[in-house]
Image (tube, coloured by chain):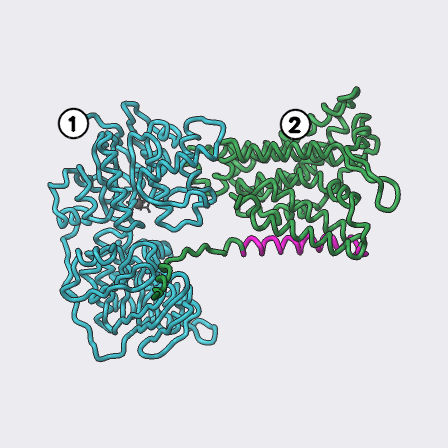
């Protein structure tokens, strides 16, 4: 085995009272993809930030190419050929993609003058090498999340790096872009670059890794080759609990009015002629590539960006949604992308978190007793295991906190719940919790529309999957057609 | 060429043209060199202050100490500095005032970095300290006899033309200094890594530091430049007015801040241009200059500036809210025509 390029030795990191990392040692070798796996909050990102110099470790060292550092600076790390694709991208929103890609190395290299054309050329080369398209000349803040992710990736690939760490780089990407990324990873591997890779998607870990290290609560639990694990055993090592699986969902009740019925929805130049139906107790998937219009359709239905044409009915009653609050009032709940992972006030009481987005009120005044009743009923429905409603969310286990998040959206008693990427960036354990809650709610009559990239998840959860392409619904898959290969084919055709 | 002028700057130019047109329709004399020279002269000091403030605002934070820096630098220089003689006698005077401004800028930077406080709070404090220092230790009386070189510089004009009604109208040679500073700051922001770092820090300081940019060093540089430019503005103001009055700028911070905001400099940081700041100052000077022929009492000038500031902020939010919509739908299939 070749000598490691980058090595963390006995690294510990505390944030105030929180121990994010405890005595973590990992080695990254040339030509090897090393996956760091673990549940949300186990310390994966913190480890990468210590290696890139963004965090100073409380104790322990980082060894780069044989040189031992107690505390790397970002500048030393960059100069030594360490590139990190941060989970939050760490891009400057006001600068163009080209400049974001070019600037860090110019700074680390001690350059004094900046040339816009040189930056543009460098960025263009990096983007072409990655095999994707990004608009390089507008501020990054105006790009979509996926384009920003691609910019961050291109930035790491733009220079001759010795070590590239990727913190959940595929979360915001669709299959096509993930393929491009993996192809690039393959080339880097051949060129002898050491790679660290973080993902919650099992298939990705197993298809790309030469080595897997599992973190739990900030400490290394185990490290080995992927063929020493199965999907189930890896999930079990990460969560520390037994493996779980779903019952195939129950068939839907066809006799009742649909929870949601959409006819001829359109908005130039985004989407047109959208017809769809979600029955009571039905779970429908909306699949499509990034930029296919899937998010725009969902946002139009719930009122974030209303449609120009078409009708929307909830439980057979026509409604007119001009804003998000119209949607909520009519019984349409919308969980936007990223919300589930970021929507909690951790130090506030569980009960207050539950009603934070939806407070029962009477003539403008809060209705105290109704609020308390609502809190208790959601806790009962979702089987949230808690001490008292007044305990902070932080006291809950991960899975239960996830239930609180969903509970927030269920407090308003929606008739149909639209979720945009509900399990994006969520670890295996919590993912199961979220899907379990959705499943249970649908059995009680809630209509659910899930927008997702995760094909296995769509297939295990949904009665039907609608495929969106270029702003139109082009296929409906159900029953026997609902297989991984058919969905992928329909979406990318 | 698409982005040569941002929308907001075009709007400012349009607004100025409209204003000139409106006033000229009523008073044809208004349209002429005299108004141009008046507006430029009135703007010279303001432009320098605005360019310095713009730098600080772009790096993230609102500076309110620039006028105190400017007047303290200039007043102390005139009172205790070299009297200067010979053809370049003004040079050491200008250099000293600029250097004092630079030093005061470094003090600003030190307070912001060491106290880890916002720029607004830090410069509110230092601004009071600078003014207090001036009145307590330097003096508060108006000095009406300037060093000889400053006096002659004050009456050295680049252009002189016949006045619109009578007499002559002229543009001081110091406009060239203002121009040079603007070009230098523009080039600094555009062509140097340090200049780009100012934008990076203002956009996202944490991301900038992960990109190897030293945030404290960038802040020190920004405050040093802004301080030096303010010191220069102070001495130019003294030279042009022919007297050093410590109360000159009292309470005029809003004029500069409004100009900067009107010029499209984002209050939240990370965005701004020299050109925008200059246009903002010119617009405000033009508004003030228009009030006189229109017979509106100049006390309304302050209200007009306030109104313009609100307009500028509304404009920024409107521009910020505008989203690019990328078409998703395929173009409709071409109609098949049967021959
Ligand atoms: N800047 C910070 N301040 C305080 N706590 C932090 C900070 N960054 C991370 N943490 C805490 O450290 C732990 C590990 O976080 P992180 O490394 O982001 O986890 P992961 O990437 O595995 O999801 C979490 O408990 C998180 O709350
Ligand atoms: Mg993370």
Residue A64 seen? yes
In the figure, the shade used to draw chain A is: cyan
Residue B173 sits above or below residue A359 on the image: above
Residue A493 position in % (x across, y down):
24, 55
Q: Which residues are drawn in magenta?
A: B294-318
Please check the rendered image and state whether residue B306 is part of the magenta-colored stretch, yes or no: yes
Residue B111 sits above or below residue A411 on the image: above
Disc 2: which chain? B
- Is residue B225 rendered to the left or right of residue A254? right
- Is residue A2 rendered to the left or right of residue A70? left
Residue A349 seen? no
Residue B295 position in % (x across, y down):
81, 56
Q: Where's the N terminus of chain A, which quadrant?
A: top left
Residue A42 position in % (x across, y down):
26, 45
Neighbours of disc 2 within 10 Å: few (<14), some (14-19), many (20+): many
Magenta portion: prevailing SS class: helix
| Disc 1: which residue | A1
Label 1 residue SS: loop
Residue A54 image-quadrant placement: top left
In the figure, the shade used to draw chain B is: green
Label 2 residue SS: helix
| Disc 2: which residue | B99
Ligand 1 near label 1 (Cβ, under 8 Å)? no
Tell me how far mark 2 sits from mark 1, CA to CA: 61 Å
- Is residue B146 rendered to the left or right of residue A452? right
Spot the residue most to the top: B86
Residue B281 image-quadrant placement: top right
């Amino acid at each position: 085995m070749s000598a490691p390029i980058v090595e963390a030795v006995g690294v510990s990191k505390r944030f105030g009272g929180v121990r994010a990392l405890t005595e973590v040692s990992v080695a990254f070798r040339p030509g090897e993809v090393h996956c760091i796996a673990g549940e949300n909050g186990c310390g994966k990102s913190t480890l990468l930030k210590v290696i890139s110099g963004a965090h100073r470790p409380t104790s322990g060292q980082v060894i780069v190419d044989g040189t031992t550092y107690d505390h790397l600076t970002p500048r030393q790390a960059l100069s030594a050929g360490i590139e990190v694709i941060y989970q939050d991208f760490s891009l400057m929103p006001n600068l163009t993609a080209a400049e974001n890609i070019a600037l860090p190395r110019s700074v680390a290299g001690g350059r004094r003058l900046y040339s816009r054309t040189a930056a543009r050329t460098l960025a263009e080369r990096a983007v072409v090498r990655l095999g994707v398209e990004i608009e390089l000349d507008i501020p990054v803040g105006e790009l979509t999340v996926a384009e920003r992710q691609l910019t961050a990736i291109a930035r790491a690939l733009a220079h001759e790096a010795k070590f590239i760490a990727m913190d959940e780089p595929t979360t915001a990407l669709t299959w096509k872009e993930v393929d491009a990324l993996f192809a690039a990873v393959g080339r880097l591997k051949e060129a002898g670059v050491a790679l660290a890779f973080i993902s919650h998607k099992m298939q990705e870990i197993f298809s790309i890794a030469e080595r897997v290290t599992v973190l739990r609560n900030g400490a290394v639990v185990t490290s080995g080759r992927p063929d020493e694990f199965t999907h189930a055993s890896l999930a079990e090592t990460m969560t520390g609990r037994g493996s779980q699986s779903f019952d195939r969902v129950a068939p839907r009740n066809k006799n009742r009015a649909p929870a949601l019925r959409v006819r001829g929805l359109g908005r130039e130049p985004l989407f047109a002629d959208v017809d769809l139906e979600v029955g009571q107790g039905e779970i429908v998937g909306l699949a499509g590539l990034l930029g296919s219009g899937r998010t725009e359709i969902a946002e139009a239905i719930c009122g974030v960006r209303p449609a120009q044409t078409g009708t929307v009915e909830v439980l057979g009653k026509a409604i007119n949604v001009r804003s998000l609050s119209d949607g909520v009032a009519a019984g349409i709940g919308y969980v936007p992308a990223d919300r589930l992972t970021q929507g909690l006030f951790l130090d506030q009481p569980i009960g207050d978190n539950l009603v934070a987005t939806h407070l029962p009120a009477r003539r403008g005044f809060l209705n105290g007793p109704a609020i308390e009743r609502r809190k208790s009923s959601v806790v009962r429905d979702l089987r949230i295991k808690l001490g008292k409603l007044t305990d902070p969310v932080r006291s809950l286990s991960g899975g239960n906190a996830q239930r609180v998040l969903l509970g927030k959206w269920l407090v308003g008693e929606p008739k149909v719940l639209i979720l945009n990427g509900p399990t994006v960036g969520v670890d295996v354990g919590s993912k199961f919790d979220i899907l379990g809650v959705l499943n249970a709610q649908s059995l009680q009559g809630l209509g659910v529309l899930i927008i997702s990239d995760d094909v296995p998840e769509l297939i295990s959860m949904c009665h039907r999957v609608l495929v969106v392409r270029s702003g139109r619904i082009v296929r409906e898959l159900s029953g026997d057609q609902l297989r991984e290969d058919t969905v992928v084919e329909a979406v990318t055709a | 060429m698409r982005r040569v002028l941002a929308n907001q700057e075009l709007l400012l130019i349009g607004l100025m043209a409209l204003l000139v047109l409106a006033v000229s329709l009523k008073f044809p004399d208004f349209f002429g060199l005299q108004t141009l020279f008046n507006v430029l002269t009135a703007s010279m000091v303001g432009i320098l202050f605005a360019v310095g403030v713009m730098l600080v605002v772009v790096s993230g934070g609102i500076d309110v100490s620039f006028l105190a820096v400017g007047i303290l630098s200039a007043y102390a220089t005139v009172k205790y500095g070299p009297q200067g003689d010979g053809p370049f006698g003004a040079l050491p005077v200008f250099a000293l005032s600029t250097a004092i401004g630079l030093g005061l800028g470094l003090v600003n930077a030190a307070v912001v970095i060491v106290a880890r406080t916002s720029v607004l709070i830090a410069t509110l404090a230092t601004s009071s300290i600078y003014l207090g220092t001036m009145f307590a230790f330097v003096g508060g009386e108006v000095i009406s006899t300037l060093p000889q070189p400053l006096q002659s510089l004050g009456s050295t004009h680049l252009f002189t033309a016949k006045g619109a009604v009578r007499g002559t109208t002229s543009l001081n040679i110091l406009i060239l200094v203002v121009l040079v500073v603007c070009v230098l700051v523009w080039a600094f922001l555009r062509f140097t890594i340090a200049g780009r770092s100012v934008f990076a820090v203002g956009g996202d300081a944490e991301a900038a530091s992960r990109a190897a940019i030293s945030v404290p060093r960038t802040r020190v540089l920004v405050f040093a430049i802004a301080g030096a430019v303010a010191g220069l503005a102070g001495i130019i103001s003294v030279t042009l007015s022919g007297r050093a009055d410590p109360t000159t700028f009292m309470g005029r911070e809003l004029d500069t801040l409004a100009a900067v905001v009107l010029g499209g400099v984002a209050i939240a940081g990370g965005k701004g241009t020299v050109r925008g700041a200059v246009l903002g100052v010119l617009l405000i000077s033009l508004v003030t200059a228009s009030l006189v022929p229109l017979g509106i009492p100049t006390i309304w000038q302050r209200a007009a500036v306030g109104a313009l500031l609100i307009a500028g902020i509304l404009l920024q939010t409107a521009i910020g809210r505008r989203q690019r919509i990328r078409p998703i739908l395929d173009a409709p299939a071409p109609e098949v025509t049967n021959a």
